[in-house]
Amino acid sequence: MAITRSRYRTATSAGTLVAFLLVLIFGSPWYVEWTQRADRGIFLETLAWPAWDFDSDAAVRDLIGADLKAILLIVFTALFITLLVGAQLASARGTISAIFTGWAAYIFAAALAAFLTSFLLPNASFSAATANAAGGAGYGLIVGWIIGLATMAGRRP
């Protein structure tokens, strides 16, 4: 039995890999602290939104909420890219369509991850979860074009 390996990366795997790297690098404690020390501009500060941390001084609920938000962002990105790429029409399979697919998937993923993890915070409410989802959607809007470029480079079904 021969094992074959495709030399092409799918749009889902390319977008998920880039989302993972964005969360890993720009959500790390050292990057978040670096952006908080001075005014770094809206783009660099927005990149630090899905911050994850392993600080032993913080409350367990806050740590789980932040880390789960970062993990869910990656998982939902993979899910939404898979759903959106599979739904593309044959006539809409172009470069621009691929960019918007990845971008929209990241916006939805960030909003849903923020919405769901908001219920882990103290004094959780639907209005607070909706406000956090809006913040996540803003992050996806500003940063999602990077995921869009990654999905453009990947092979679509």
Image: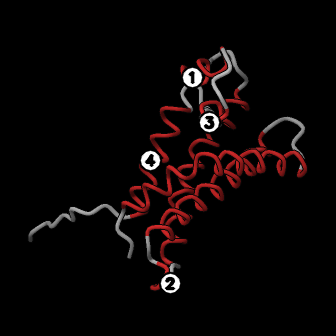
Q: Quadrant location of the N terminus?
A: bottom left
Label 3 or label 4, whichever lies nearer to me, is 3
Q: CA distance from mark 2 to mark 4?
A: 24 Å
Q: What's the amino acid at mark 1? A: Pro
Residue 123, position as x, y percentages in the image: 90, 38
**Mark 4: few, some, or many residues within 10 Å (few <14, many ≥20)?**
some
Residue at left offset 78%, top offset 50%: 134
Q: CA distance from mark 3 to mark 4?
A: 17 Å
Left or right: 59 in relation to 72: right
Label 2 or label 1, whichever lies nearer to me, is 2
Residue receiving disc 3: 43
Left or right: 106 in relation to 15: right
Q: CA distance from mark 2 to mark 1?
A: 41 Å
Return the disc, 3 or 4, that comes first in the chain's sequence: 4
Residue 33, position as x, y percentages in the image: 61, 18
Quarter of the image holding residue 65? top right
Q: Which mark is residue 18?
A: 4
Q: What's the amino acid at mark 2? A: Leu
Comparing 108 with 44, the one in front is: 44
Residue at left offset 82%, top offset 48%: 129
Provide the secondary structure element on which disc 1 rests: helix
Left or right: 109 in relation to 24: right
Label 3 or label 1, whichever lies nearer to me, is 3
Return the disc, 2 or 3, that comes first in the chain's sequence: 3
Check whether the beta carbons of the residues at disc 2 and disc 1 lie within 8 A of each other: no
Residue receiving disc 1: 29
Residue at left offset 61%, top offset 32%: 48
Residue 84, position as x, y percentages in the image: 54, 71
**Mark 3: few, some, or many residues within 10 Å (few <14, many ≥20)?**
few
Q: What's the amino acid at mark 4? A: Val
Residue receiving disc 2: 89
Q: CA distance from mark 3 to mark 1?
A: 17 Å
